[in-house]
Amino acid sequence: MLETGTKAPAFSLPDQNGDMHTLEEYRGKKVILYFYPKDSTPGCTKQACGFAELYPQFMEKGAVVLGVSKDSVKSHKNFETKYGLPFTLLSDPDKEVIQAYDVWKEKKNYGKVSMGVVRTTYLIDEDGVIVKAMDKVKAAENPQQMLESL
C-alpha cells in the first residue's frame, strides 16, 4: 500500500465506455480511487452499490469516485448497466496501475494462496497527493468511511 503524503502515481486507463481517463484530468478535485477484485462478485457489488447510493453526497463534497479492477471494459459496462452505477469504472487488465498502487498481493482464501487485488481505497487530494490510504477494507463499510473522510 502506498503511504499517505506521497504523490499518487499517474495513470491512463479506459473506462466502461472505452474512453481514456488520466489522474491529471481530475486535478482540482478530490478523488476516491478504489481497487476491487472482480465485477459482479458479492463483496464488490456491495461496495460499488454503496458508492452509487452515496454518490450525490460525494459530488456535493467535490469528490469523484473511480473504481479500478483488472476486468475488461466490456465486463465493467455490464457491471455498470446491471447495477446502475453512476461513477467511472477503470479497466486495468495489464495490472500496471494496480501494481503502481501496490494492491496486487498474495492472498489466502480457505488455505489456498494466490495473487490478486487486495481491496484498497485511496483518497487523493486536489493536488494529486494521497491523503488517506485504507487496505483490506470491508466492502459494505468502505463507501460510508470514505464519505466521512471528506
Image: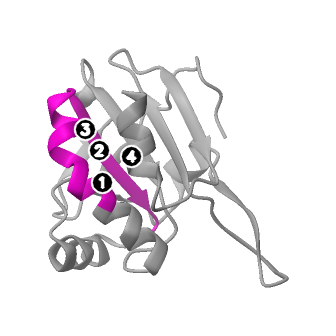
Classify mark 3: residues with Cα within 10 Å, few (<14), some (14-19) or many (20+).
some
Q: Which residue is mark 4?
A: 144
Q: CA distance from mark 1 to mark 4?
A: 8 Å
Q: Residue at x 60, y 23 (%)?
A: 4
Q: Which label's residue is closer to the chain start, 4 or 2? A: 2
Tell me if residue 87 comes above or below residue 40 in the rendering.
Answer: above
Q: Is residue 134 visible?
A: yes
Camera-side mark, 3 or 4: 4
Observer-nearest residue: 56 or 12?
Answer: 56
Q: Which residues are magenta?
A: 50-71
Q: Residue at x 43, y 69 (%)?
A: 44
Q: CA distance from mark 3 to mark 4?
A: 14 Å
Observer-nearest residue: 7 or 29?
Answer: 29
Disc 4 is placed on an element classified as helix
Camera-side mark, 2 or 1: 1
| Mark number, residue 51 | 1
Classify mark 1: residues with Cα within 10 Å, few (<14), some (14-19) or many (20+).
many
Q: Which residue is mark 2?
A: 65
Marks 3,1: beta carbons within 8 A:
no
